[in-house]
Image (cartoon, rainbow, N blue to C red):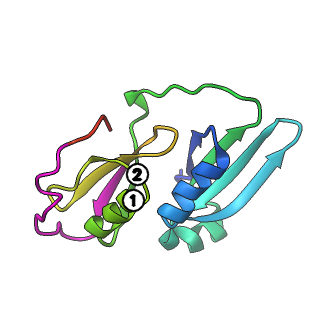
Amino acid sequence: MRYLHTMVRVSDLDQSVHFYGTLFGMKELRRVDSEKGRFTLVFMVADEDVDSFERSRSPAVELTYNWDPEEYTGGRNFGHLAYEVDDIYGFCQHLMDNGITINRPPRDGRMAFVRSPDGISIELLQKGEAKEAAEPWASMPNTGTW
């Protein structure tokens, strides 16, 4: 058994590709349009996983866009996606500078949570050891849910 991908349904494909691609720095490595099924699949891959995806089509986040409008509701039972980042403070600042709410700030220098445009909870983890606690993160309150 091996892990392949996590599929999330998205309501605005361009907005989601911007979020995962431009803001998170992931690469779109595969796109499938199904006229018969009326959907588009976009496989987004983190930089460090590009070689693995090109060899074995894993690991990835599969963005599924259904062409016919649907309303998606989420629940905590989904859990979350998780990504390791080189500089959690810098990455969170980058997201904030681009209008993304940091729902659970990295007060501990180790972990933060944000939500995608479709409400998918995403955990960000500092690569290696936790950073020293620093402002404004150390005293920043939680916002919403994650």
What element does badge 1 sit on?
helix
Q: Answer with left or right where residue 80 lies relative to residue 73.
A: left
Report how far apart the C-alphas of labels 1 and 2 lie in the structure. Answer: 5 Å
Q: Whole-percent x and y of residue 82?
A: 39, 52
Dominant secondary structure of the magenta stretch? loop
Q: Answer with left or right where residue 140 lies relative to residue 23.
A: left
Between residue 89 and residue 99, name the one nearer to us: 99
Q: Whole-percent x and y of residue 132?
A: 11, 69
Between residue 116 and residue 85, name the one nearer to us: 116
Residue drawn at x 58%, y 43% is 7
Q: Is residue 75 visible?
A: yes
Q: Quadrant of residue 78?
A: top left
Mark carried by residue 108 = none
Mark carried by residue 95 = 1
Up-down: is 1 above or below 109? above
Q: Whole-percent x and y of residue 23?
A: 48, 62
Between residue 102 and residue 34, name the one nearer to us: 102
Q: Which residue is mark 2?
A: 100
Q: Is residue 59 visible?
A: no
Residue 77 part of the magenta segment: no
Residue drawn at x 51%, y 72% is 47
The residue carrying pointer 2 sits among few (fewer than 14), some (14 to 19) or many (20 or more) residues within 10 Å by Cα, namely some
Amino acid on which disc 1 is placed: Leu
Up-down: is 83 above or below 90? above
Q: Whole-percent x and y of residue 81?
A: 42, 48
Q: Which residues are magenta?
A: 122-141
Residue drawn at x 47%, y 28% is 74
Q: Earlier in the sequence, mark 1 or mark 2?
A: 1
Residue drawn at x 42%, y 26% is 75
